[in-house]
Amino acid sequence: MLDIAETSSPSEPPASGSTPAPLAGGVCFGEGPRWFEGLLWFSDMLGEAIHTVNLRGSMTTVPLPGHSPSGLGFRPDGSLLIASATDRLLLSYDGDTVSTLVDLSDQVPADLGDMVVDAAGRAYIGSQAYSGGVIVRVDPDRSVQIVAEDLDFPNGMVITPDGGTLIVAESMGRRLTRYSIGADGGLRDRRVFADGLDGPPDGIALDAAGGVWTAMTLANQFERITEGGAVTDRIDTGGRAAIACALGGPQRRTLFLLSSPGAYPKRLIGTRDSRVDTVTVEIPGAGLP
């Protein structure tokens, strides 16, 4: 989720040789895509629902009336965690029932955004303050701890395959930031993965070569970025806002691309023009989610 007004003209990296193919549409504002058990799961933040879609484009819906789902993540037991943005709740869906797991409204400075869940079932959730944003960790026992502070609108997050590094997109800072993950789940050794990006980064996905596919929201493109900031590939959205991405499908070589007519969610209330496209990539996905 992004709601900022600045933008700049992007540089000219190589363009992708693949043309995105439409998979699904008809949702209000798609966010937080996750590949799990043969389905792409994603939030419809303004439509108050979670959707699944298979590779043939068949969709199902889990209604979430009264909630604004954003980040998603699966625990090892298969339960789905849902960050509900504006009411700042962490929800749980067991396949039948949606329940409130933790109320974070008194512990975070701003609405909730993206989330990544590690192999131990610990959920790392961004609280999207424009400055002074935080990452909060919710453990399986429901204990809560702030594990990163002073972030400029924390957004998409990934964890490397060894479980040792978390990368987060800082939208207002136009950078990707990395942390070492301690055995206790703490985040340490903050450093820059890439900065000076072409646009505010939103959702991200990690591949097996260490590249980070990044939704460059206001630059209307998805970029593959390597450590240090080199852009090795670009997928143009045709003027649509790039919101989030995920790697899944067979061998995790399907890049799912979520885009919307605009980057400002509140302007899209009542519309149904957010969509999911796909591109096949050479380097498969890796790590979490």
Image (cartoon, helix red, strand yellow):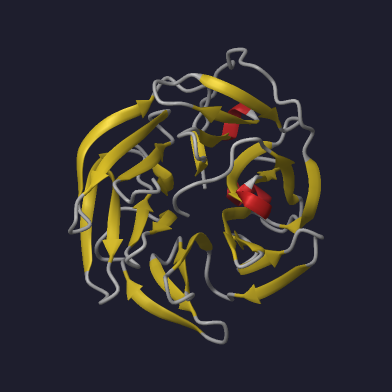
Whether residue 249 is visible here, answered yes or no, is: no
Of 208 and 129, nearer the camera is 208
Q: Quadrant of residue 21?
A: top right
Residue sticking out furthest to the front: 251
Q: Residue at x 34, y 34 (%)?
A: 177
Whether residue 31 is visible here, answered yes or no, is: yes
Number of numbered discs present?
0
Q: Tell me: residue 74, above or below residue 148.
A: below
Residue sticking out furthest to the bottom: 96
Relative side of 197 to 36, left or right: left
Residue 62: image location, x then y, percent: 64, 75
Q: Quadrant of residue 119?
A: bottom left
Residue 24: image location, x then y, percent: 78, 56
Q: Residue at x 19, y 56 (%)?
A: 183
Of 240 and 120, nearer the camera is 120
Of 92 and 13, nearer the camera is 13
Q: Residue at x 65, y 45 (%)?
A: 253
Relative side of 262 to 6, left or right: right
Of 12 and 36, nearer the camera is 36
Relative side of 166 to 260, left or right: left
Q: Tell me: residue 7, above or below residue 280.
A: above
Q: Residue at x 42, y 19 (%)?
A: 196
Residue 217: image location, x then y, percent: 58, 35
Relative side of 68 to 183, left or right: right
Q: Quadrant of residue 118?
A: bottom left
Residue 215: image location, x then y, percent: 57, 37
